[in-house]
Amino acid sequence: MQNERPTPGRDALYRWDRVHAITGLSRSTISTKEREGTFPRRITVTPRTVAWLASAVHAWVDEQAAAARAPIAPVAIASDSRPRKVRDTEPAPA
């Protein structure tokens, strides 16, 4: 199976096996991500056949790779941010 991108100016339709080979995602994960709006929506080709636009799948992979390469911003921690024991201000009942 080739993992080549479609010819510029012509988009291809990728069936499930190709999308899985490119992304490594399971069917349930893809369905969940589609519902969340974080993965390209499938196209119904026939009543029993769905596919994804190749350009959309590759764009998603590129976005994931860019996000993985992005530097993580350091988190500033105040010097007095250690947890402290909280004391009751009222005396315990006798």
Image (spheres, rainbow, N blue to C red):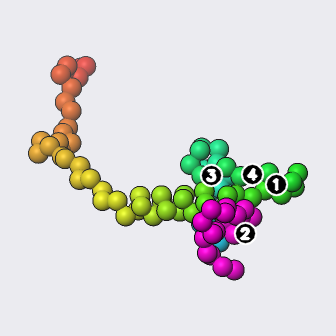
Residue 31 in the image, given as x and y percentages of width and height:
68, 51
- Distance CA(mark 4)–CA(mark 1): 6 Å
- Distance CA(mark 2)–CA(mark 4): 15 Å
Residue occupied by mark 1: 45
Asked if residue 22 can be seen in this view, the reply is no
Residue occupied by mark 3: 40
Q: Nearer the viewer, mark 1 or mark 3?
A: 1
At horizontal 20% and vertical 38% (from top left) the residue drawn is 85
> Callout 2 environment at 10 Å: few (<14), some (14 to 19), or many (20+)?
few
The type of residue carrying mark 1 is Val
Callout 1: SS = strand
* Quadrant (top left, top right, bottom left, bottom right) of the N terminus: bottom right
Query: Do the residues bearing badges 1 and 2 touch, measured as CB atoms within 8 Å?
Result: no
* Label 2 vs 4, first from the N-terminus: 2
Extreme residue toward the front, this view = 9
The type of residue carrying mark 2 is Asp
At horizontal 74% and vertical 51% (from top left) the residue drawn is 43
- The kind of secondary structure the magenta stretch mainly shows is loop
How many numbered callouts? 4
Query: Do the residues bearing badges 4 and 1 touch, measured as CB atoms within 8 Å?
Result: yes
- Distance CA(mark 4)–CA(mark 3): 9 Å
The type of residue carrying mark 3 is Pro
- Distance CA(mark 2)–CA(mark 3): 15 Å
Residue 44 in the image, given as x and y percentages of width and height:
79, 51
Residue occupied by mark 2: 17
At horizontal 21% and vertical 26% (from top left) the residue drawn is 88
> Callout 3 environment at 10 Å: few (<14), some (14 to 19), or many (20+)?
many
Q: In the picture shown, does residue 41 fall above or below 85?
A: below
In the image, the segment drawn in magenta is 1-20
